[in-house]
Amino acid sequence: MKELDGRVAVITGGASGMGLAFAHRFAAAGMKVVIADIEVPALEAAVDGLREAGADVLGVRCDVSDAGSVHDLAAAVDEAHGAAHVLCLNAGVASTDTLDQSSLADWEWILGVNLMGIVHGLDAFLPGILARDEGHVVVTASVAGHTAYPGLGPYSATKHAAVAIAETLQNELTASGSSVGATALCPGFVRTGIFTSERNRPEHLVDALAEPPTDEDIATREGFLEMIAEEAPLPEVVADMVHDAVVSQTFWVFTDDRHVDSIGNRHEEIRTRTNPTEARTIAEDTFSRQGDT
Ligand SMILES: NC(=O)c1ccc[n+]([C@@H]2O[C@H](COP(=O)([O-])OP(=O)(O)OC[C@H]3O[C@@H](n4cnc5c(N)ncnc54)[C@H](O)[C@@H]3O)[C@@H](O)[C@H]2O)c1
């Protein structure tokens, strides 16, 4: 999409982190932005901040795991602007646990937001974007959509699905000769609120039987958050990449090269029918490559 000025960007998970950075970047390019999010105080603060920056912004409370809520968002966009052009299916949550420790509540929460959120977004917005033959769909996946690190099962399952959905969309756009573009955004670690995702977990999906964290768990987590604060890029850096991908119709966007070897090894293991060997966690793999961005 070469011409963004005056067009409309709709961003789920737009109240914080990468989604909020996308909103600022697209607004700076002259777009009207609609940010949708479940976290109302953050949403209100985000709308205020965007307005102060001169943006034409609409904030909509939306739970992407609920099809009706996403259709209400589409109706609000239609009423305000008549169309959506850039659609960022970005809302997401994460938790870390081995498969034997992941409860059904964990699975339901993560699949509901990260996978069904994308499905609901496509269901509500894609037919309109295709009919106008103008626009771009950005699916926020992850490097976890190309790997299978221990301790990230439900999250990786949703991100592999996100990659598959985005790639299928791109192939269908090509097959039909559409002018619409697609991007699979596959970030490594980025300095955002994803590491406190539990703040948005609905009460009925809280894992009542989860063991409280041990002192060792707490110390490991603190060390990890320090590494993120020191080494992970800011969401604004990713927002520039996404803006450029929309304008240039670039499909694959990776935010760093730290996982290239792991992804390459996995592809080679699949090609040669070798048993999987990735025994490190994503944090161990990422931060074993000091200074490599
Ligand atoms: N930060 C990273 O290291 C990283 C890496 C790879 C991929 N990602 C992906 O990036 C996307 C954006 O996350 P982020 O890192 O900016 O984290 P973030 O927590 O700052 O932003 C995620 C947003 O999604 C919203 N959200 C959560 N549940 C929702 C729901 N049910 N309905 C609507 N909105 C909901 C949150 O309120 C929040 O504003 C996610 O899909 C995440 O999986 C993040």
Image (cartoon, helix red, strand yellow):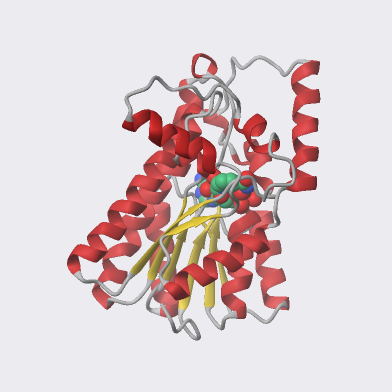
Residue 149 lies, in percent from the top left, at 53, 28
Report the residue at 59% width, 14% height from top. Answer: 209
The quadrant of the image that shows the N terminus is bottom left
Query: Is residue 40 in sight in this rendering?
Result: yes
Above or below 214: residue 203: below
Query: Is residue 199 in sight in this rendering?
Result: no
Residue situated in front as seen by the camera: 245 or 38: 245
Report the residue at 39% width, 33% height from top. Answer: 268
Report the residue at 33% width, 28% height from top. Answer: 272
* Quadrant assignment, res 27: bottom right
Q: Residue furthest left?
A: 176
Residue 87 lies, in percent from the top left, at 43, 65
Residue 9 lies, in percent from the top left, at 48, 71
Residue situated in front as seen by the camera: 225 or 259: 259
Residue 39 lies, in percent from the top left, at 62, 51
- Could you tell whether 272 is left or right of 89 in the image? left
